[in-house]
Image (spheres, rainbow, N blue to C red):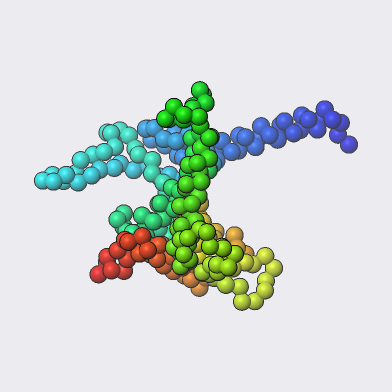
Amino acid sequence: MLSGAELGRAALYLSKLNLQLVKAAGARRMRVGKGAGARLPGAVQGAPVHLVELSRPIPGEKAERVTPVGYKTARRTLPRLLSSLDPDDPRLMVAQQIADAAERVDAVPGSNFAGSDSKGEISDGGATTRVKHAARLRDYEALANGWPLDRRKARAKRVPLVALAVRRRVAGRHSVKAFDAVRLACVECLSLDEILRRHGWPARMEYRNRVRDAVLKTLDRIAVEMGNTPAAEKTN
Protein backbone atom coordinates (compact mmCIF):
# COMPACT_ATOMS: atom_id res chain seq x y z
CA MET A 1 0.00 0.00 0.00
CA LEU A 2 1.24 3.50 -0.87
CA SER A 3 1.80 6.05 1.84
CA GLY A 4 0.15 9.48 1.82
CA ALA A 5 3.33 11.12 0.52
CA GLU A 6 3.65 8.58 -2.29
CA LEU A 7 0.02 9.05 -3.27
CA GLY A 8 0.58 12.81 -3.34
CA ARG A 9 3.62 12.47 -5.62
CA ALA A 10 1.72 10.09 -7.91
CA ALA A 11 -1.23 12.50 -8.14
CA LEU A 12 1.12 15.41 -8.92
CA TYR A 13 2.88 13.40 -11.63
CA LEU A 14 -0.44 12.39 -13.24
CA SER A 15 -1.77 15.94 -13.16
CA LYS A 16 1.38 17.25 -14.88
CA LEU A 17 1.20 14.46 -17.47
CA ASN A 18 -2.48 15.19 -18.11
CA LEU A 19 -1.72 18.90 -18.58
CA GLN A 20 1.00 18.08 -21.11
CA LEU A 21 -1.41 15.85 -23.04
CA VAL A 22 -4.05 18.57 -23.10
CA LYS A 23 -1.55 21.18 -24.30
CA ALA A 24 -0.26 18.85 -27.02
CA ALA A 25 -3.79 18.10 -28.23
CA GLY A 26 -4.61 21.81 -28.32
CA ALA A 27 -1.45 22.59 -30.30
CA ARG A 28 -2.33 19.93 -32.87
CA ARG A 29 -5.89 21.22 -33.28
CA MET A 30 -4.75 24.83 -33.74
CA ARG A 31 -1.92 23.80 -36.10
CA VAL A 32 0.63 25.54 -33.90
CA GLY A 33 3.97 25.78 -35.70
CA LYS A 34 2.36 25.18 -39.11
CA GLY A 35 2.89 28.44 -40.98
CA ALA A 36 3.25 31.99 -39.70
CA GLY A 37 0.54 34.31 -38.44
CA ALA A 38 -1.54 34.95 -35.35
CA ARG A 39 -4.16 32.50 -34.15
CA LEU A 40 -5.98 31.51 -30.99
CA PRO A 41 -3.89 30.00 -28.20
CA GLY A 42 -3.70 26.23 -28.43
CA ALA A 43 -6.65 24.77 -26.53
CA VAL A 44 -8.63 21.55 -26.75
CA GLN A 45 -11.94 23.45 -26.63
CA GLY A 46 -10.94 25.41 -29.74
CA ALA A 47 -12.23 23.98 -33.00
CA PRO A 48 -9.68 22.37 -35.35
CA VAL A 49 -8.41 24.75 -38.02
CA HIS A 50 -6.86 24.59 -41.46
CA LEU A 51 -4.49 27.17 -42.91
CA VAL A 52 -5.45 29.03 -46.09
CA GLU A 53 -4.58 32.16 -48.08
CA LEU A 54 -7.66 34.37 -48.27
CA SER A 55 -8.50 36.69 -51.15
CA ARG A 56 -11.54 38.72 -52.19
CA PRO A 57 -12.85 39.76 -55.62
CA ILE A 58 -12.46 43.38 -56.74
CA PRO A 59 -14.52 45.03 -59.50
CA GLY A 60 -12.45 45.18 -62.65
CA GLU A 61 -9.68 43.05 -61.20
CA LYS A 62 -9.20 39.37 -60.48
CA ALA A 63 -8.79 39.40 -56.72
CA GLU A 64 -7.15 41.16 -53.80
CA ARG A 65 -5.07 39.19 -51.35
CA VAL A 66 -6.36 39.41 -47.78
CA THR A 67 -3.83 37.19 -46.03
CA PRO A 68 -0.42 38.94 -45.92
CA VAL A 69 2.28 37.46 -48.12
CA GLY A 70 4.18 34.74 -46.28
CA TYR A 71 1.35 34.16 -43.81
CA LYS A 72 -1.59 31.78 -43.54
CA THR A 73 -5.03 32.46 -42.09
CA ALA A 74 -6.39 29.91 -39.61
CA ARG A 75 -9.99 29.01 -40.38
CA ARG A 76 -12.31 26.58 -38.62
CA THR A 77 -12.13 23.11 -40.13
CA LEU A 78 -15.58 22.03 -41.25
CA PRO A 79 -16.66 18.40 -40.98
CA ARG A 80 -16.95 16.56 -44.28
CA LEU A 81 -20.72 16.85 -43.99
CA LEU A 82 -20.55 20.65 -44.37
CA SER A 83 -17.27 21.19 -46.19
CA SER A 84 -18.86 20.54 -49.61
CA LEU A 85 -21.41 23.36 -49.19
CA ASP A 86 -20.86 26.65 -51.01
CA PRO A 87 -19.68 29.55 -48.81
CA ASP A 88 -22.97 31.40 -49.43
CA ASP A 89 -25.19 28.36 -48.86
CA PRO A 90 -27.86 29.29 -46.26
CA ARG A 91 -27.33 25.96 -44.51
CA LEU A 92 -23.66 26.71 -43.95
CA MET A 93 -24.51 30.18 -42.67
CA VAL A 94 -26.93 28.69 -40.14
CA ALA A 95 -24.34 26.10 -39.10
CA GLN A 96 -21.80 28.85 -38.43
CA GLN A 97 -24.34 30.87 -36.44
CA ILE A 98 -25.17 27.86 -34.27
CA ALA A 99 -21.47 27.17 -33.67
CA ASP A 100 -20.87 30.84 -32.85
CA ALA A 101 -23.72 30.94 -30.31
CA ALA A 102 -22.59 27.69 -28.65
CA GLU A 103 -18.99 28.88 -28.35
CA ARG A 104 -20.03 32.22 -26.88
CA VAL A 105 -22.10 30.54 -24.17
CA ASP A 106 -18.95 28.86 -22.81
CA ALA A 107 -16.40 31.50 -23.78
CA VAL A 108 -17.64 34.99 -23.00
CA PRO A 109 -15.13 37.58 -21.78
CA GLY A 110 -16.17 38.70 -18.34
CA SER A 111 -14.69 41.85 -16.89
CA ASN A 112 -11.36 43.56 -16.92
CA PHE A 113 -8.98 43.57 -13.97
CA ALA A 114 -10.69 46.67 -12.60
CA GLY A 115 -13.96 44.77 -12.21
CA SER A 116 -15.91 46.75 -14.78
CA ASP A 117 -17.26 45.95 -18.22
CA SER A 118 -16.55 47.74 -21.52
CA LYS A 119 -19.12 50.45 -20.66
CA GLY A 120 -17.52 51.29 -17.33
CA GLU A 121 -20.30 49.69 -15.32
CA ILE A 122 -20.09 46.84 -12.81
CA SER A 123 -19.61 43.60 -14.72
CA ASP A 124 -21.75 40.52 -14.15
CA GLY A 125 -18.94 38.26 -15.37
CA GLY A 126 -20.53 37.79 -18.77
CA ALA A 127 -23.69 36.16 -17.39
CA THR A 128 -26.03 38.44 -19.36
CA THR A 129 -24.23 37.70 -22.62
CA ARG A 130 -24.27 33.97 -21.93
CA VAL A 131 -28.02 34.10 -21.32
CA LYS A 132 -28.50 35.94 -24.60
CA HIS A 133 -26.57 33.38 -26.63
CA ALA A 134 -28.20 30.47 -24.79
CA ALA A 135 -31.55 31.97 -25.79
CA ARG A 136 -30.34 32.07 -29.40
CA LEU A 137 -29.56 28.36 -29.22
CA ARG A 138 -33.02 27.62 -27.83
CA ASP A 139 -34.55 29.59 -30.69
CA TYR A 140 -32.53 27.57 -33.22
CA GLU A 141 -33.73 24.38 -31.55
CA ALA A 142 -37.33 25.58 -31.69
CA LEU A 143 -37.05 26.46 -35.39
CA ALA A 144 -35.46 23.08 -36.11
CA ASN A 145 -38.31 21.19 -34.45
CA GLY A 146 -41.18 23.40 -35.53
CA TRP A 147 -41.86 24.62 -31.98
CA PRO A 148 -43.25 28.07 -31.15
CA LEU A 149 -40.63 30.64 -30.23
CA ASP A 150 -42.66 31.74 -27.21
CA ARG A 151 -40.39 30.58 -24.37
CA ARG A 152 -43.20 30.99 -21.82
CA LYS A 153 -44.93 27.86 -23.13
CA ALA A 154 -44.04 24.61 -21.42
CA ARG A 155 -41.12 22.84 -23.08
CA ALA A 156 -41.92 19.49 -21.46
CA LYS A 157 -44.72 18.85 -23.96
CA ARG A 158 -42.54 19.52 -26.98
CA VAL A 159 -41.52 16.47 -29.01
CA PRO A 160 -38.20 16.81 -30.89
CA LEU A 161 -37.70 15.57 -34.42
CA VAL A 162 -35.69 12.35 -34.53
CA ALA A 163 -33.16 11.57 -37.23
CA LEU A 164 -32.65 7.96 -36.23
CA ALA A 165 -35.08 6.23 -33.88
CA VAL A 166 -34.44 3.09 -31.85
CA ARG A 167 -36.88 0.44 -33.07
CA ARG A 168 -35.43 -2.50 -31.19
CA ARG A 169 -33.97 -2.05 -27.75
CA VAL A 170 -30.19 -2.50 -27.77
CA ALA A 171 -27.97 -1.83 -24.76
CA GLY A 172 -26.29 1.55 -25.01
CA ARG A 173 -28.20 2.63 -28.12
CA HIS A 174 -30.17 5.88 -28.13
CA SER A 175 -32.27 7.72 -30.68
CA VAL A 176 -30.43 10.46 -32.59
CA LYS A 177 -32.37 13.71 -32.34
CA ALA A 178 -32.11 15.92 -35.40
CA PHE A 179 -31.00 19.08 -33.59
CA ASP A 180 -28.56 17.14 -31.41
CA ALA A 181 -26.96 15.82 -34.59
CA VAL A 182 -26.78 19.37 -35.94
CA ARG A 183 -25.02 20.59 -32.81
CA LEU A 184 -22.56 17.71 -32.80
CA ALA A 185 -21.73 18.34 -36.46
CA CYS A 186 -21.59 22.14 -36.32
CA VAL A 187 -20.19 22.80 -32.85
CA GLU A 188 -18.04 19.75 -32.11
CA CYS A 189 -17.19 19.08 -35.78
CA LEU A 190 -17.94 15.37 -35.39
CA SER A 191 -18.18 13.13 -38.42
CA LEU A 192 -21.28 11.08 -39.15
CA ASP A 193 -19.52 7.96 -37.86
CA GLU A 194 -18.64 9.72 -34.59
CA ILE A 195 -22.21 10.94 -34.15
CA LEU A 196 -23.52 7.42 -34.64
CA ARG A 197 -20.99 5.86 -32.27
CA ARG A 198 -21.76 8.44 -29.59
CA HIS A 199 -25.39 7.24 -29.68
CA GLY A 200 -24.45 3.57 -29.76
CA TRP A 201 -25.12 2.95 -33.47
CA PRO A 202 -22.84 1.12 -35.90
CA ALA A 203 -21.37 3.25 -38.68
CA ARG A 204 -23.41 1.73 -41.51
CA MET A 205 -24.06 3.55 -44.77
CA GLU A 206 -27.82 3.41 -44.23
CA TYR A 207 -27.55 5.12 -40.84
CA ARG A 208 -25.00 7.66 -42.07
CA ASN A 209 -27.28 8.69 -44.94
CA ARG A 210 -30.26 9.15 -42.65
CA VAL A 211 -28.34 11.30 -40.20
CA ARG A 212 -26.74 13.32 -43.03
CA ASP A 213 -30.13 14.00 -44.62
CA ALA A 214 -31.60 14.96 -41.24
CA VAL A 215 -28.79 17.43 -40.51
CA LEU A 216 -29.00 19.13 -43.91
CA LYS A 217 -32.82 19.26 -43.84
CA THR A 218 -32.75 20.69 -40.33
CA LEU A 219 -30.30 23.41 -41.32
CA ASP A 220 -32.45 24.14 -44.37
CA ARG A 221 -35.57 24.35 -42.20
CA ILE A 222 -33.93 26.85 -39.85
CA ALA A 223 -32.69 28.92 -42.80
CA VAL A 224 -36.19 29.07 -44.28
CA GLU A 225 -37.73 30.06 -40.95
CA MET A 226 -35.14 32.82 -40.66
CA GLY A 227 -36.14 34.11 -44.09
CA ASN A 228 -33.22 32.78 -46.14
CA THR A 229 -33.64 31.16 -49.54
CA PRO A 230 -33.83 27.35 -49.33
CA ALA A 231 -30.70 25.64 -50.64
CA ALA A 232 -32.78 23.58 -53.11
CA GLU A 233 -34.18 26.73 -54.73
CA LYS A 234 -30.82 28.48 -54.73
CA THR A 235 -29.22 25.74 -56.84
CA ASN A 236 -32.01 25.71 -59.47
Percent coordinates x, y for residue 123 in the rendering: 51, 32
Give the left or right position of residue 36, taking residue 107 as reference.
left
Q: Residue furthest top?
A: 114
Q: Is residue 227 above or below residue 7?
A: below
The answer to whether residue 52 shows anywhere in this view is yes
Percent coordinates x, y for residue 54 in the rendering: 29, 42
168 or 152, which lies in front? 152
Percent coordinates x, y for residue 46 in the rendering: 49, 42
The answer to whether residue 107 shows anywhere in this view is no
Q: Residue furthest right?
A: 1
213 or 8, which lies in front? 213
Give the left or right position of residue 151, taking residue 65 as reference.
right
Residue at 38% x, 35% y is: 35
Give the left or right position of residue 161, taking residue 169 as reference.
left
Q: How many dots with numbers?
A: 0
User: For residue 234, what is the image quadrant?
Assistant: bottom left
Residue at 50% x, 50% y is: 134
Residue at 62% x, 66% y is: 174
Residue at 62% x, 35% y is: 19
User: For residue 13, what is the image quadrant?
Assistant: top right
Instruction: Classify the position of the N terminus by image quarter.
Output: top right
Percent coordinates x, y for residue 90 in the rendering: 33, 59
Q: Residue furthest left?
A: 60
Instruction: Classify the position of the C terminus by image quarter.
Output: bottom left
Q: Is residue 41 above or below residue 100?
A: above
28 or 234, which lies in front? 234
65 or 180, which lies in front? 180
Q: Residue furthest bottom?
A: 167
